[in-house]
Amino acid sequence: MVVEPIKIEEYKSEITPTWCPGCGDFAVLRGIHTALARLKIKSENVVISSGIGCSSNLPGFVNAYGFHGLHGRSLPIANGIKLANTDLTVIATGGDGDGYGIGLGHFIHSMRRNIDITYIVMNNQIYGLTTGQASPTSERGMLTKSTPSGLLEVPVNPIALALISGATYVSRGFSGNADHLSSTIENALSHKGFSLVDVLSPCVTYNKIQTYQWFRDRVYTLEDEEHDTNDLKQAISKSYEWESKIPIGVFYKADKPTYDGDEPALQDGPLVNQPLDTGKNIAKQLLDEFT
Ligand SMILES: Cc1ncc(C[n+]2csc(CCOP(=O)(O)OP(=O)(O)O)c2C)c(N)n1
Ligand code: SF4
């Protein structure tokens, strides 16, 4: 059967993004629109969840189902949606504050499950929405509104964390390289299992250090090197490159069992297609068991 191409425009919602001109999140939005169109995934089969932040406003700008949840909670929502209906393409989105700060526990446990969802983090190394406080990925020593004498903590390394926590597609994109970013998102969506796309997505308003130019001076693509994406140890070593050379692209990918693939309750197909079995007898059985 020939599947008709879908135009990128069909994935744009009627809402115009409210981001500052030049915000890196525009490239991520464009990357999601492009990847969905290339993969010909129909809008009605896509759900995007998010937490709170400038980046977490993204689901409103995609013509698909969306759930704008609580700060740090995009992943539990995405996990629940996927388990309820495994036929859907489920994407979780948000910022570094949202996902690597308040939501860090969900990040690790979602990866341990290798649940088949894609997590796209717009990592600008600052809290954008709340006007410029330090985030979990801000550099040590950085002067921000919340660290006027310089940040005393070392940054979270999301790529290394993903590699040791069980994610089976671990990648990094850069908003200043839109074509590469779109392909990375497309491959993440095609991957079966938990895929992470950590995106270097500059906040042009509150992070005056990690700018587009700062990244352009350092970024190189792993696809141009002899990097073996099956080699976990090599991937971990690459994940520590940061100061002068910053790799983007796929660090690691593996074909491993997924939580949704192995869950016994899902062996007869998506939960939404299974009978509810809520007859009087079931209600009585439950009451007898729990009262
Ligand atoms: C429980 C809770 N704590 C704190 C906040 C305030 N808050 C809203 S967004 C945000 C951080 C935003 O930074 P990030 O997630 O990196 O997204 P960005 O705005 O940079 O895209 C914070 C601390 C909140 N909304 N809810
Ligand atoms: S404050 Fe920063 S993260 Fe928020 S929209 Fe503006 S540039 Fe983007």
Image: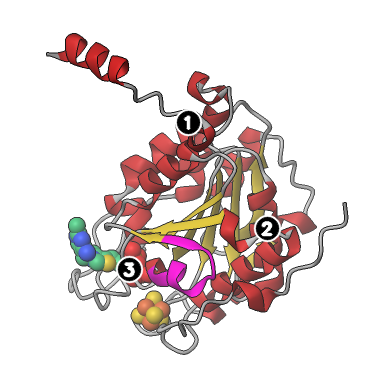
Query: Range of the magenta residues?
Result: 57-66
Q: Is residue 103 magenta?
A: no
Nearest to N terminus: mark 2 or mark 3: 2
Number of the label disc, if any, that sits on residue 113:
1
Give the image location of residue 53, x and y in percent. 33, 68
Q: Is residue 154 visible?
A: no
SS at mark 3 in the image:
loop
Residue in the foreground of this view, choosing between 195 and 229: 195
Amino acid at pointer 1: Arg
Residue linked to disc 2: 41
Q: Residue at x 37, y 85 (%)?
A: 205
Q: How far is the residue under mark 2 from the one under mark 1?
A: 24 Å
Q: In which image quadrant can residue 98 be found?
A: bottom left
The residue at 47%/81% (across/down) is: 23
Residue 53: which disc?
Answer: 3
For the C terminus, which image quadrant? top left
